[in-house]
Image (tube, rainbow, N blue to C red):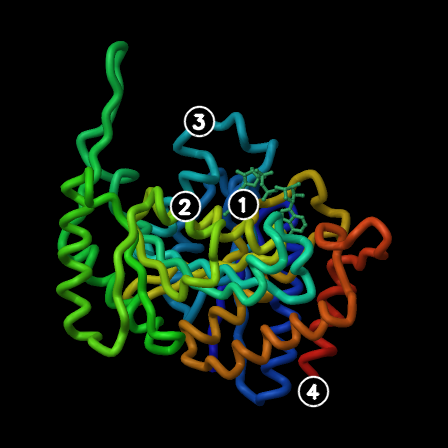
């Protein structure tokens, strides 16, 4: 039995989460596992109901399930609220409360969408790597921080345990992939990066079967667009990962295709990387694939069922190979499917 908390959120969130839930239900029918899906409000939807973006009840539900599935939060309606009430603050809070210290973002290029990439087909074809971004430490959280009229300051600090635990996850993931980890830092300039590098190499002693190399972050930004196929698993700090995972994502084509997982020791949350897309919300136009692929990550990382993850990716690939497209990935001469039709096509492809 798998207990999943579903958090549709705002904008297109409910539309894409409905697609992911339809896929979960199909898989439960097909493989005969029991599925309990509990829906909870978060973000603007929660603010409108309860006056807060993240209630204790939603948080408690997240602590009592096997995995959380999130759509997206935020939108113009809640943008003028004070910072502590904004959806971004609620996202940071849920990650912190659930101890989600690693953000995983795959950069996978689908053959059928190769022309959607901003890079040449030859450069991106076959790209398939996974970025591990440290999520709860580094310069986004370090103290002291602040600014006055004459200066601004932040602190980039990493504790040993913070580096060890994410390095371990990255090495474990590499074992199930092509066995290569590249750790990205700025050790030529930053002491905190030298420390990061030292600790990653110490952890590597337990993973001698995995090949580890280091790369400076400026070079990594270049290499990702020059030759993305050279990467298998990337591990990096919060700030560098924030930037590199966006670059990595965009070479693969559309925002509507990119899933993510945020995982900790006890809990895990799966969500598309895109936002609530207020410009197309409520129009049944959003691409549900990023959220459906997030379910694939859930099967792999939370349920230990990589074969079901592969089944989902294959259903997505086969659906795209038939030429089916939502508006964001369709070329001008192609007819675009609605969110619900794309969902139905993928569910059909999964079979009974
Ligand atoms: P966005 O990702 O919502 O949208 C950017 C563009 O991509 C829009 O044109 C949108 O229509 C398109 N797009 C995004 N997802 C799509 C999909 N699945 N299918 C088709 N097209 C898609 O980013 P934004 O416009 O900068 O932000 C909108 C709101 O979302 C803001 O309130 C922002 O704070 C919030 N946001 C939330 C998250 C999150 O919940 N994790 C992440 C990013 C932004």
Q: Which residue is mark 2?
A: 221
- Quarter of the figure with residue 22: bottom right
- Quarter of the figure with residue 110: bottom right
User: First in sequence: mark 3 or mark 1?
Assistant: 1
The mark closer to the camera, 3 or 1, is 1
- Residue at 42% across, 62% down: 230
| Label pair 4/1, CB-CB below 8 angstroms | no
Marks 2 and 4, how far apart in space?
43 Å
Marks 2 and 1, how far apart in space?
28 Å
Helix, strand or loop status at disc 1:
loop
Whether residue 6 is situated above or below residue 313 in the rendered picture: above
Q: Crowding near pointer 1: few (<14 within 10 Å), some, many (20+)?
A: many
The spot of residue 109 in percent (x, y) is 58, 62
Q: Nearer the viewer, residue 249 or 268?
A: 249
Q: Crowding near pointer 3: few (<14 within 10 Å), some, many (20+)?
A: few
Q: Which residue is mark 1?
A: 73
Judge left or right: residue 154 versus residue 271. left
Whether residue 90 is situated above or below residue 120 in the rendered picture: above
Q: Which residue is mark 4?
A: 352
């Amino acid at each position: 039995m798998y207990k999943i908390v579903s958090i549709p959120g705002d904008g297109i969130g409910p539309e894409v989460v409905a697609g992911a839930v339809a896929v979960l239900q199909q898989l439960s029918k097909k493989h005969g596992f029991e599925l309990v899906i509990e829906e909870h409000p978060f973000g603007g939807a929660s603010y409108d109901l309860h006056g807060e973006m993240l209630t204790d009840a939603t948080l408690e539900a997240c602590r009592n399930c096997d995995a959380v599935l999130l759509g997206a939060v935020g939108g113009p309606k809640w943008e003028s609220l004070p910072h502590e009430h904004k959806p971004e603050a609620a996202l940071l809070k849920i990650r912190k409360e659930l101890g989600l210290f690693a953000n995983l973002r795959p950069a996978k290029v689908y053959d059928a969408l190769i022309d959607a990439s901003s890079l040449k087909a030859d450069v991106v074809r076959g790209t398939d790597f996974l970025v591990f971004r440290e999520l709860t430490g580094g310069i986004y959280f370090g103290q002291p921080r602040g600014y006055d009229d004459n200066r601004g300051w932040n602190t980039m600090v990493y504790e040993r345990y913070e580096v060890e635990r994410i390095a371990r996850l990255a090495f474990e993931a590499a074992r199930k992939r092509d066995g290569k980890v590249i750790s990205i830092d700025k050790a030529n300039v930053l002491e905190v990066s030298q420390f990061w590098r030292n600790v990653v190499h110490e952890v590597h002693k337990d993973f001698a079967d995995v090949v580890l190399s280091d790369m400076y972050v400026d070079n990594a930004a270049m290499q990702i667009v020059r030759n993305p196929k050279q990467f298998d698993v990337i591990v990096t700090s919060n700030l560098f990962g924030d930037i590199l995972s966006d670059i990595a994502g965009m070479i693969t084509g559309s925002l509507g295709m990119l899933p993510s997982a945020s995982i900790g020791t006890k809990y895990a949350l799966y969500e598309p990387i895109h936002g609530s897309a207020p410009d197309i919300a409520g129009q049944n136009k959003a691409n549900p694939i990023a959220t459906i692929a997030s379910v694939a990550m859930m099967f792999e990382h939370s349920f230990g069922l990589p074969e079901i993850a592969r089944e989902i990716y294959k259903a997505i690939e086969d659906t795209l190979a038939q030429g089916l497209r939502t508006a964001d990935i369709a070329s001008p001469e192609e007819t675009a499917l609605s969110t619900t039709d794309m969902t139905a096509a993928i569910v059909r492809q999964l079979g009974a």
